Amino acid sequence: MGYREDIITACKALESDGLNRGASGNVSVRDGGDMLITPSAVGYDLIEPKMIARMSLADDTGAWDGPNKPSSEWRCHHDILCARSDINAVVHTHAPYATILAIARKPIPALHYMIAAFGGPDIRVCDYARYGTAELSSHILAAMEGRNGCLMANHGMVVGAGDLTRALWLAGELEALAHQYVHTLAIGGPVVLSDAEIEETARGFESYGVQAKEPVV
Ligand SMILES: [Zn+2]
């Protein structure tokens, strides 16, 4: 399967996993000097491979190739792929629990060892800027320094990874951590793991293989 089919498969997984609140999700993949990204305003059940828009990473005017306009949130995908050579796939959604925390502007602490998959002991909330703006991209990149994802203030979440399988997995893990955090706050808040405990977990993940879909413990 090519990247276009992979993107459609990922969109359907976002839907079936409950991460695609109100068709908010969008997905991109690096393809050489270009990115392929989901179209704007097309239901996931109707997306065909030709509708995935191709945009040059060397151009930030919003120009695209293909019959369908790219997602209105193409700019943050474009800017993450340009700034982060370690990231080849980006998933953005308004998944329910991640969005609740983003609205409350609560970063996720190390309440579960799985947070180590994001590159450190927390998941930050980036500052607010209107969707689709270069200002929002720069806030996201700052919050993703040393991390594979962040919450976006009053908006949602974004994750990036070396490939789309891993990015999709991270999106599900981020939502799981957000779900755990929201409910833990209701019973007095989590006992937070130390930075050393998260570093130890990260080393364990590395020995298992960084591209592993789910670490075995
Ligand atoms: Zn959005």
Image (cartoon, rainbow, N blue to C red):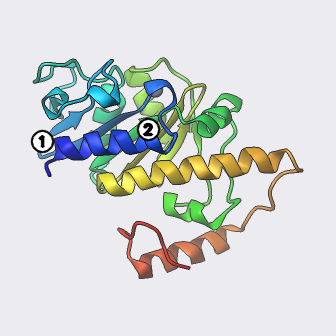
* Among the 4 quarters of the image, the one containing residue 207: bottom left
Q: Which residue occupies the extreme right position in the image?
A: 188
Q: In this view, does 140 lie above or below 69?
A: below
Q: Which label sits in the foreground, 2 or 1?
A: 2
* Mark 2 crowdedness (10 Å alpha carbons): few <14, some 14-19, many ≥20: some
CB-based contact (under 8 Å), mark 2 and mark 1: no
Q: In this view, does 76 lie above or below 184?
A: above
Q: Name the secondary structure under disc 1.
A: loop
In depth, the one of 139 and 189 nearer the eye is 189
Asked whether the viewer can see residue 101, the reply is yes
Measured from the top left, where is residue 150 in percent x and y? Answer: 52, 43
Asked whether, in this view, residue 192 is left or right of residue 159, the answer is: right
Asked whether, in this view, residue 200 is left or right of residue 44, the answer is: right
Measured from the top left, where is residue 42 in percent x and y? Answer: 30, 21
* Mark 1 crowdedness (10 Å alpha carbons): few <14, some 14-19, many ≥20: few
Q: Is residue 27 above or below residue 207?
A: above
Residue displayed at 36% across by 24% down = 73
Asked whether, in this view, residue 158 is left or right of residue 153, the answer is: left
Asked whether the viewer can see residue 123, the reply is no
Q: Residue 33 carries which label?
A: 1
In primary-sequence order, the first of circles 2 and 1 is: 2
The residue identified by callout 2 is 15
Q: What residue type is labelled 2?
A: Glu
Disc 2/disc 1 C-alpha distance (Å): 29 Å
Residue displayed at 50% across by 57% down = 118
Q: What residue type is labelled 1?
A: Gly
Measured from the top left, where is residue 159 in percent x and y? Answer: 43, 45
Q: Name the secondary structure under disc 2.
A: helix
Residue displayed at 27% across by 39% down = 8
Q: In this view, does 137 lie above or below 68?
A: below
Asked whether, in this view, residue 140 is left or right of residue 1, the answer is: right
